[in-house]
Amino acid sequence: MGEWVADREARAAEPEMIVPDMVKTFVAYFYRHIREKNVYEILTMYETSFHKLSERYFKASPWPSEKAVAPLVEHDHVFCLLYKEMYYRHLYARLTPTLEQRCESWDNYCALFGVILHGNVNMQLPNIWLWEMVDEFIYQFQSFCQYRGKLSTKSPEELELLKRCDGVWNVLGVLNYLQALIDKSGIVDTLSKERDGEEAFSVNDGYDYSASNVLRLLGYFSMVGLLRVHCLIGDYRSAVKAVEPIDLDKSGMFTKVPGCYITTLYYIGFALMMQSRYCDANRTFNTILLYIQRTKAYHQRTAIYDQVLKKNEQIYALVAVCLSICPASVKFLDEGCAQVLREKYNDKMVKMAAGEVALYDELFSYACPKFITPCPPSFEDPSANVNQEAFRLQLGLFLEEVRHQAVLPTMRSFLKLYTTISLSKLAALLELDEYAVRTTLLSLKHKSRQPCIVAGRNVLDAEWAAATDIDFYIDNDMVHVVDNKVQRQYGDYFATHIMKNERMALEISRIAEVITTEI
């Protein structure tokens, strides 16, 4: 790692870029507001001013280095760490970071988290910044794993440098920092007290003006970070367990930051889907689809609007997959979401229900997270590209489950036609022997049961229940069928249209008043 350190020192000796006066003013005021704990002004400068200055001065270039702005902020060490966190985030968003810059960003996160964990940070920072700090930390880890996996595009010098960077963006280091923030913050105990009515953590948006909110909020968002990391490496049970202290049924802190809310429910839903809990997955996806639908107008004014739209499309694709495998999960969908789903994926869902595996492959590939291989590749084969290995593994596991259920939709459709049918007749219809039919029926019975969330309990504490729109039992050589029609909930549908009717009536009244006044 000595080469990139030497190169960094050489660059530090080069003349610094000229800092525009508006940028100097921004940095000075930003520093002052952080010192004064003026959260409202910090939020405005972080969300608005920083992006406006980026568009005006640094659209295709990095911000001034920390060395250039340090004299403006009295060389404050903690502020410089925060500034560099924003600096590297902008760099990743607008440019392609070099290996050296990736290593420097890792060093900066290590230093920043080290100060927060072991120092006395007396600051109040906006929740959205603290969330995006954790989110960007994981994104850069994911980006480094993908960068490292493309050995075929690296020069011999880059390969040699990569060998020396085995401790940079290491998966154990990332997990250890996230877990350390959770443990040091005591957030698990805080959330437990909040359930018992002894704390008002979420009510106060995580702020406690008698002490810094930085460690507590970073600890809270790090649980969501662990959820994401475990999903990226394919450990779905650990992913769900990471957010076990968070009460997902209530409006906790994770609902106060839109990016955190969408990320949390997307990864929980995906983890449940990969554990064959399709009803719970669709219940989770439905919640986030309704949220995006309600807040879409608000997100149009934010920087994450495009990401929200993309995530919305991905979630609809995952809902289509879950519904094709488990038709009974439709009862967890709002009528509006179900209608949009039919418009987007009706033809594909019909084909998937008929066993067309290629469509499952297509939708899964589009909507799944960007899986990573956390361990370094073998540098003995520079032509290798291991980036797709993790994705192919997860795709293969999912399609294997789909193939196990390939004949079940056909069996289900035949059973819906009868109240009783003999095994011999069913075998003739399916063009199978009686033994294969009996085996398939048992498989259908087995696949129709899955763990389901129980009200008042956490996601892991589920109970096995039937998740099917049809039930049956075998008596000797006869199959007796009970059609369990899914009871749709129409309350939301009618409530929505009543509200639309009231708005239209109000608008008509206003128009009538205007016309009357003009006459």
Image (cartoon, rainbow, N blue to C red):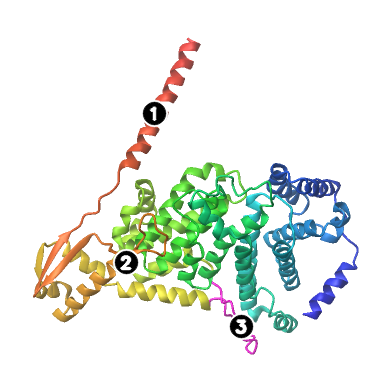
Residue at position x 38%, y 53% in the image: 341
Pointer 3: residues within 10 angstroms few (<14), some, or many (20+)? some
Q: Residue 194 carries which label?
A: none
Position of 406 compared to 99: left or right?
A: left
> Mark 2 and mark 3 in contact (Cβ < 8 Å)?
no
- What is the x, y in percent for residue 40? 69, 42
Please tell me whether mark 3 or mark 2 is closer to you in this view: 2
Q: Mark 1 points at which residue?
A: 502
- Amino acid type of the residue that numbered disc 1 sits on in the rendered structure: Glu
Distance from disc 1 to disc 3, alpha carbons, whole Å, reads 62 Å
Distance from disc 3 to disc 2, alpha carbons, whole Å, reads 37 Å
Please tell me whether mark 2 or mark 1 is closer to you in this view: 2
Q: How many labels does the image show?
A: 3
* 15, 359: nearer the viewer: 15
> Mark 1 and mark 2 in contact (Cβ < 8 Å)?
no
| First along the sequence among labels 1 and 3 | 3
Residue at position x 28%, y 49% in the image: 488
Element carrying mark 1: helix
Position of 423 compared to 42: left or right?
A: left
Q: Mark 2 points at which residue?
A: 450
Position of 112 compared to 312: left or right?
A: right
Give yes or no for residue 419 being in the magenta stretch. Answer: no
Quadrant assignment for the N terminus = bottom right
Q: Mark 3 points at which residue?
A: 377
- What is the x, y in percent for residue 251? 49, 48
- What is the x, y in percent for residue 172? 61, 75
What range of the chain is rendered magenta?
371-388
